[in-house]
Image: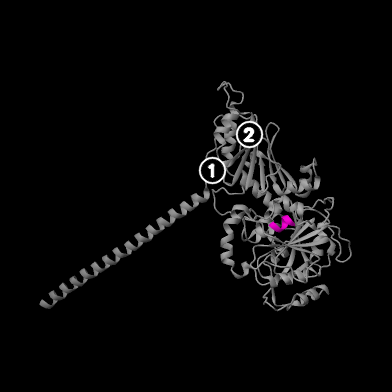
């Protein structure tokens, strides 16, 4: 299968792919090769139906291969009689197990320009592959999600021949009763966001691996599927596709039957509980996946880049302290400088021209959130934001949080913070600059492309709490108003409890006084009666 040359890239605004015009089904000539990768473990009967449907696709058979990654099935999987022309089984690579690991193994063996991820329990309609591939002929950074319907499937209900013949004549929709299925839970979100065109960064939330496709180059740029994600790997990879600049397209014409219910349908509570810490550690869309304040994670929420090549130790210290003590705690800090020039040879300790660089390395280099590099990486992927801060400028406790809120509300790909002395800081969306790199190519004006596709905005840095460092400037820890409010609420509850106790005690005292008064009154009345009787 011969790879095609890179196509010219359109400039899609945010996730509004409406400007793209895919070919009409059945009325175009495909050129891209495609690999349908199927991770599989057992269930030979369902796999046979999946392959029978793929053997009847409208996409040219000479351009389509199917790779089944056998995840250690016992007995091993075998190719059935009815299958696509180019079809093979590869073993899952050693060192792992599970759906994600098997898929990763199959994708590495695939040869197509485009990879279609398909589960081993899916029966595709005849134009499933064609409907998705027509988008990939328009741009190399589109992630297409197919439409699927879940049905309660019983083994033996269909034969591979019945499936193949129904799909070939365009009758796959009639294989099951039209009202006996369930749609995926993301369908409502797709509808509410104008088929994702108004979804912005949230578009990646609908990505599921049961039926999805992307260019091989985009798959590799996004770091491939994470084999450590035993469950929920599709959501995690969808997030990374978004940070790599993907445009997400829900293709309703790419339909399929899912034979049986998904794990989230049959055991949703336990599946959600299992996935929560994995998502919190890796996925930042939506940001509420990280409910725990004061934590650091595998994937930082913001990567700050500070050039300390010519900075004084005090300046670098103040900047890093500001970044580390803000209300946004999941911040990674990259300090760029000529670190390789530092050696341990004899030198004038106090007159060393590299003294400040040595102090910065000693004072900040062992912080687990800090990395020392010669040159800043080209991207902050997979962190969603990059904050470029000049050394000697100190972010306030709310600076990063307010910038995140601004970008999430307005969608800006770039926010420039103007500072005195013709100095600027920058807050960048990773996905915006990743897409800009794809559409402009090497040496292109990425700022201009970001402004066109996502928007750029300039603010006064002082308005966002960015201040110059003083001689001994180290920011005070931020006031955690939430914690204070919780303390005040606890104090109020304590005093309310005390008041309730005192109120109860007062009622008891009053009752006792009333009882004593009544006893005295009865005694006095008794004495008066006795006196009257003696008379």
Which label number is shown at residue 478?
1
Q: Main secondary structure of the magenta part?
A: helix
**In terms of sequence position, does the residue under pointer 2 or pointer 1 come before the other?**
2
- Image: 178 above or below 340: below
Q: Position of residue 188 (x, y in %)?
A: 69, 66
Examine the structure image and report whether residue 39 is included in the region drawn in magenta.
no
Location of residue 146 with respect to 161 vertically, above or below? above
- In terms of secondary structure, where does tag 1 sit? loop
Most extreme residue toward the left is: 534
Report the magenta residues as a range: 105-109
Rendered-image quadrant of the C terminus: bottom left
Image height of 119 relative to 388, above or below:
below
Where is residue 428? Give x, y as percent. 70, 44
Q: Is residue 535 visible?
A: no
Please provide percent x and percent y for residue 89: 72, 63
Question: Could you tell me how many numbered marks the image carries?
Answer: 2
Task: Identify which residue, 42 or 257, lies in the foreground.
Answer: 42
Q: Nearer the viewer, mark 2 or mark 1?
A: 2
Asked if one can make out residue 441 in the rendered structure from this viewpoint, the answer is: yes
Query: Which quadrant holds residue 21?
Result: bottom right
């Amino acid at each position: 299968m011969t790879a095609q040359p890179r196509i010219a890239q359109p400039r899609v605004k945010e996730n509004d792919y409406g400007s793209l015009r895919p070919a009409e089904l059945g009325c175009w000539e495909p050129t891209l090769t495609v690999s349908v990768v199927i991770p599989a473990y057992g269930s030979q009967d369902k796999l046979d139906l999946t392959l029978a449907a793929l053997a009847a696709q409208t996409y040219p058979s000479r351009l389509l291969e199917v790779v089944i990654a056998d995840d250690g099935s016992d007995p091993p999987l075998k190719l059935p009689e009815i299958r696509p022309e180019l079809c093979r089984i590869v073993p899952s690579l050693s060192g792992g197990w599970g759906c994600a690991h098997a898929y990763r193994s199959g994708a590495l063996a695939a040869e197509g320009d485009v990879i279609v991820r398909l589960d081993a329990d899916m029966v595709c309609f005849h134009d499933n592959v064609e409907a998705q591939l027509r988008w990939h002929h328009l741009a190399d950074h589109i992630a297409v999600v197919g439409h699927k319907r879940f049905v309660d499937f019983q083994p033996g209900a269909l034969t591979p021949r019945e499936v193949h013949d129904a799909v070939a004549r365009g009758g796959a929709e009639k294989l099951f009763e039209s009202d006996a299925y369930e749609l995926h839970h993301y369908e409502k979100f797709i509808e509410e966001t104008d088929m994702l065109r108004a979804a912005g960064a949230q578009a990646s939330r609908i990505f599921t691996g049961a039926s999805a496709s992307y260019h091989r180059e985009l798959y590799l740029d996004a770091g491939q599927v994470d084999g450590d994600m035993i469950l929920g790997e599709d959501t995690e990879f969808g997030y990374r596709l978004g940070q790599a600049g993907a445009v997400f397209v829900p293709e309703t014409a790419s339909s399929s039957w899912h034979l049986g219910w998904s794990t989230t349908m049959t055991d949703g509570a336990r599946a959600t509980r299992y996935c929560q810490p994995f998502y919190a550690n890796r996925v930042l869309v939506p940001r509420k996946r990280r409910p725990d304040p004061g934590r650091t994670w595998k994937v930082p929420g913001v990567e700050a880049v500070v050039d300390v090549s010519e900075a004084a130790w005090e300046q670098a210290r103040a900047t890093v302290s500001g970044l580390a003590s803000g209300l946004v705690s999941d911040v990674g800090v990259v300090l760029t400088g000529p670190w390789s020039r530092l050696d341990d040879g004899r030198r004038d300790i106090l007159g060393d021209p590299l003294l400040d660089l040595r102090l910065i390395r000693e004072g900040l280099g062992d912080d687990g959130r800090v990395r020392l590099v010669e040159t800043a990486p080209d991207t902050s992927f997979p962190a969603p934001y990059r904050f470029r801060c000049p050394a000697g400028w100190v972010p306030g406790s709310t600076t990063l949080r307010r910038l995140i809120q601004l970008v999430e509300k307005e969608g800006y790909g770039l926010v420039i913070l103007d500072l005195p002395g013709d100095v600027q800081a920058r807050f960048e969306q990773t996905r915006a600059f990743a897409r800009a790199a794809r559409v402009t190519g090497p040496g292109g004006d990425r700022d201009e492309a970001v402004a066109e596709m996502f928007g750029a905005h300039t603010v006064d840095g002082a308005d966002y709490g960015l201040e110059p460092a003083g001689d001994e400037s180290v920011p005070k820890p931020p006031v955690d108003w939430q914690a204070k409010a919780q303390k005040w609420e606890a104090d109020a509850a304590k005093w309310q409890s005390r008041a309730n106790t005192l109120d109860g005690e007062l009622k008891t005292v009053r009752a006792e006084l009333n009882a004593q008064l009544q006893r005295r009154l009865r005694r006095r009345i008794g004495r008066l009666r006795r006196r009257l009787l003696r008379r």
